[in-house]
Amino acid sequence: MSATTDRPEAAQRVVLHLPDWAPRRARRMAHVLRPAVPPEPATFDPAALADLPEPARRWLTHAIVPGAPIAHRAELQMHGEIRLGRHWHAFTAEQLLMPESGFVWAARTNVGHLPISGFDGYAAGVGLMRWRMLGLPVQADTGADVTLSALDRLAAEATLLPTSLVGATWRPGPDADTAVYAHHVTGRHARSHVTIRVTPDGRLQRVTMRRWAAPDGRRYRLHTFVVEFDAEFDAGTMLVPDGISANWADAGGEFFRAELDRVTFE
């Protein structure tokens, strides 16, 4: 799926926020994720990629318009399907993403005729999940395991804001079309490592990582987490990976499918 945004308009600074239907705690977390305003916003210069592995250069030069503002935060509206148990359920969601600090993903779906809404997030050093059905809590979790899992998720989702990876630490991947970046979050010592695969024409095709999680609902441990993309969303100054499919390669397979409806940067 793609949408075209007028480039001058896309470069303007906007204030991003979650919608009123998002839980109050989610909106409070989102408020924490506000980038500092530099005196003179940096812009993208392809020369800054000179030392990156070739697949990383191929993707980022394809994805980012030269001279585009270096955005630090994105708002993404999306729709798709999520697998809960054995069944797939349609959802809509809005996400605030600031790869250097955190994210909040707020979504709504239905199980049968019963509405479920809530959010997953990471901000100020804490990972959190809060979900309700008919207004009653059905999942509320935090702690070290949830926080580590959220940090790994944030590392993979940094690819949805390509400018956030221009200054990342990169190394060559296991073959000619792959590269690996180390993702660091402000205030944290741990780094998550993510492998990207890039098509010959520069489109991001896949990200793979070992992610701390409990997809089977039991014990947390490292699992192989894979996200594939089969399209791009034209957000004016950037081509954002789209046609999203996420799966646990060693623990149940595909569980998430989404298409982007709107992307805004600041």
Image (cartoon, rainbow, N blue to C red):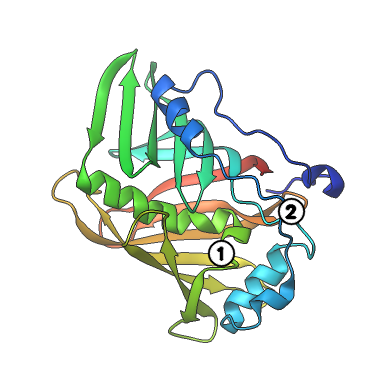
Q: Which of 47 and 87 is in front in this view?
A: 47
Side of 42 relative to 175 (left or right): right
Q: Where does residue 214 sit, x and y in percent of width and height?
A: 22, 49
SS at mark 2 in the image: loop
Residue 119 visible to an observer of this rendering: yes
The residue under label 1 is which amino acid type? Leu
Q: Where does residue 7 sit, x and y in percent of width and height?
A: 84, 49
Asked if residue 159 is positioned above or below residue 45 in the image, the reply reads above
Q: Where does residue 144 sit, x and y in percent of width and height?
A: 21, 47
The residue under label 2 is which amino acid type? Glu
Furthest residue toward front: 39
Residue sitting at x 79%, y 65%: 66
Asked if residue 242 is positioned above or below residue 170 in the image, the reply reads above
Instruction: Give the quarter of the image for residue 122.
Output: top left
Residue 40: which numbered mark, if any?
Answer: 2
Asked if residue 214 is positioned above or below residue 183 in the image, the reply reads above
Instruction: Give the quarter of the image for residue 193.
Output: bottom left
Q: Where does residue 43 sit, x and y in percent of width and height?
A: 74, 60
Provide the residue designation for mark 1: 165
Which quarter of the rendering shows the C terminus?
A: top right
Residue sitting at x 48%, y 23%: 22
Side of 57 relative to 47 (left or right): left
